[in-house]
Image (cartoon, rainbow, N blue to C red):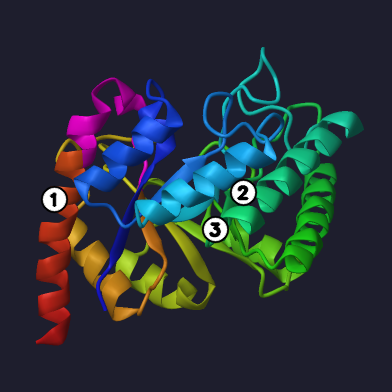
Amino acid sequence: MNLRFGYNTNGFAHHRLNDALVVIAGCGYDGVALSVDVQHCDPFNVTATELRQLKGMLKALQLSVVIETGARYLLSKWFKHEPTLISRQPEGRALRLQFLKRAINLAADLDAEAVSFWSGPRAKDVTEEEAWKWLIAGCNEITTYAERKGVVLAFEPEPGMMVDTLTAFDRLKTHVPSPAFGLTLDIGHIFCTEPERFEALVRQNAPLLRNIHIEDIKGRVHEHRMFGEGDIDFPPVLRALHAAGYRGMINVELSRDSYRAPDVARRSLQLLRQWAAKAQASVTH
């Protein structure tokens, strides 16, 4: 079983979506992490005809797809990533839920492997008790919706957000027990936040893994970097995923490198394929 690699369209911010897909496929990727955003399949404006055309293009390019919901200013022109599932205003939480349900609809239409999302940061005027109550309620609501649509969810712990560690995710998962509610594991994020070795974390969480993000990190500072520009040793990471039998996509996430997207996408896959070959050979032997 070969590891499967994708590239996140948030790393093609200056490309039209169709052009980004052609480049991603042309580099040799197995799939795409589609960050639905103002310029890439905006879920509030995309038409049925456009969706059919996108599905046909993905099929023609032989690209699998995961839906990503990390758009920065799609819901608010003033505040990045707002509103969230834990925002103070009920109408803000409702807007986030509407967005996530639209993302689930897109996933169903495109036969996506998962929809990835996160908690958002907790504002100072929101207590921890309130935030957890709203987050659990929101996650259960969209999980029920996803189950009806036959869509898998993948929750992502992220530094700076309320659910930032795997321990916090475990707490959330106890309140959202559905098999449709899984985990997005970001390699850079856990390098920043987790004290345990990656191999142990993969073994512990393998049954819940639905989506992987991958990038380099330097000095445990949450800033996504091109491979080789940070401190992560990637062959053991890929070896652990291969040994665990992970079958989902491993998606490169380098939004800050959009200005050099084709070159970075090409070089990223070359490195990942080299490391994956070594990792898989070491597992086999």
Q: Is residue 43 magenta?
A: no
Considering the numbered disc 1 on the image, is that residue within a helix, a strand or a loop? Answer: helix
Dot label at residue 271: 1
Q: Is the magenta stretch mostly helix, strand or loop?
A: helix
Nearer to us in this view, 239 or 103: 103
Which residue is the site of mark 3? 112
Reply above or below: 67 against 249: above
Please report contact status of discs 1 and 2: CB closer than 8 Å, yes or no.
no
Q: Distance between the residues labelled 3 and 2?
A: 24 Å
Dot label at residue 115: none
Q: Indicate which label's residue lies in the foreground, 1 or 3.
A: 3
* Residue depicted at x 62% and y 64%: 152
Q: Where is residue 17 in the image (x, y as percent from the top left)?
A: 44, 32
* Residue depicted at x 54% and y 62%: 183
Q: What residue type is labelled 2?
A: Val
One can see residue 158 in this view: no
Q: Residues within 10 Å of mark 1 (few under 14, many from 20)?
A: few
N-term-proximal mark, 1 vs 3: 3
Which residue is the site of mark 2? 163
| Residues drawn in magenta | 252-265
Q: Distance between the residues labelled 1 and 3?
A: 26 Å
The single residue placed furthest to the top in the displayed view is: 78
Left or right, 126 with respect to 61, comes to: right
Q: What residue type is labelled 3?
A: Ala
